[in-house]
Image: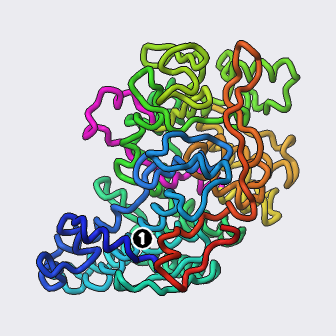
Amino acid sequence: MPINKFWILIIALGLSSCTKFLTHDDPVAVTDETWWKTEANATGALGSVYAGLPGGSDGRQLMFLSALSDEAVARQDTRGSYELYGKGLANSSWNVALSVWQDDFKDIRRACRFLENVDRCFMDSTLRERYKNEARAMRAYYHMELLMFFGGIPIVTESVDPLKDDLKRNTEQEVYDFVMSELTACIPNLPASYNSNEAWRISSGVCYALMSKLAMYYGHFDVAKSNAKAVIDQGTFALYKSTNAKANSYAELFLYTGELNKERIFFKDKGCAGAWLTFAPAGVGGKTVVSPTNVVLNNFETLQGKTLAELPADSQAIYRQNPNYKNNRDPRLVGAVLLPGQSYQGITLQPFAAGADQLGAQNATATGFWVNKYLDPKDRNAASANRTLDYMIIRYPEVLLNYVEALIETADWQNPDVLTYINQIRNRAGMPAADGVKYNSQEKLRDLVRRERMSELCFEGARFFDIRRWKIFGTVMTGQVYGATNPATGEATPVETRNCNPDRDVRYPIPLSEMLANPNMEQNYLY
């Protein structure tokens, strides 16, 4: 069962009083009778439910999912053995899967404890009901995350005894139905928005966005479409545009300058506080754990709206050698990636020359490229406590792209909303509108929206799920991975060989510790 020997370890280690109580009963510390008294107690307990939200470069590290797709590679096992997965070597002892399993079920139990006990607190009844729905929606979110990684998992709606190790897996359909029904039930009881100090809380808009994301993953396009449209119709969220007309609005969105924006639907407070020691070049005091592949670079169009494949061979060669040649690429490129030869923080990035940033050196890039999203120069010399950049788990453009793709896949590709919302995203980034004459069929629009998803959402975890639901996992996760073009040879640098099994690796393995502790647990196929 999900709550097994891991909890015994937590008890042995000991936690703060709030966290300790929410994970077990300690007879010599806080108990149900002494804890659940006031509104402050309820607020603190609910805060511990939110504490489990994944960050981008912290916690469950959603940006590392790029390294489990064709967008990036990861090094340094101290942050998780992501490299094993790409090589097809992950098994039931894989630490990344274990971390997700433990964290999510811990957070589910915290939510259950909250729902079982909050009525004991003396507090405003209206606030209590809202808190209950927040906890219930968050519990659904943690089930959803497990479902999308592992498939069917036990549905947990009560704080199961930590020593109870016999729960069986529910089917994928059962977990899907549970998540959708729970989120649907919470929507009428949650506000569309909060004040700025509480913007991180789960809202009705977050619930709609989560349902759209989950429905997209399972190909339920009508459901995805209606929930995405509900977010749009709320009018709460909008694409971010800088107040500086000369600024790259897309790039600014991931910096402290653009942190407080109406584009973030669901976010983790301080969820990218560790970005500098995850993505930054070693030559400026950073560490590069996740490095982009050339797949991402080759996906970006030129400023004229041309794909590289549409250009003559000599032009393609120029852009592969110098991806942002004459600044003639989609501005999202430089917002997402740092490039060889680029001046950054007083140095020139030279992955093919001797030095701290030489490709393959310790803490250096593994591909010749660097992730630039959430990499704010203010964090370079800042103390750890002053690195506080939030991470956006779901942004408004993802909802717009869900809506557009759902229209296309339900044969409503001629709906004017398709190009309206694609062009809103492109125009915000400084790209020309997509030509309706050129993109005049379902197939061509499908290619466009898939390209837009990578251009807009790269390194944010979306690609991990996209390649699975599009059934291209086996194609893009086997074979040679390449990085930047070596100027000495004119050839793209081979980085690693991927050897994923599409019949097995579309799911994470159930952790070995769970299999050993729970006689009713069944392992995923081929693990």
At 62% across and 30% down in the image, what residue appears?
367
Amino acid under disc 1: Met
Residue 430: which quarter of the image? Answer: top right
Q: Secondary structure at mark 1?
A: helix
**What residue would you read off at disc 1?**
138
**383 is within the stretch colored magenta:** yes
Instruction: Point out residue 264 in the picture as x, y percentages from the top left corner.
Output: 46, 51
Numbered range of the magenta stretch: 375-401
Instruction: Point out residue 508 in the picture as x, y percentages from the top left corner.
Output: 60, 63
Quadrant that contains the C terminus: bottom right
Badge 1: how crowded within 10 Å, few (<14), some, or many (20+)? Answer: many
Q: Is residue 203 visible?
A: no
At 66% across and 44% down in the image, what residue appears?
454
**461 is within the stretch colored magenta:** no
Q: Nearer the viewer, residue 22 or 128?
A: 22
Residue found at the very far front of the displayed protein: 516
Residue 6: which quarter of the image? Answer: bottom left
Q: In the displayed structure, does residue 376 sit left or right of residue 33?
A: right
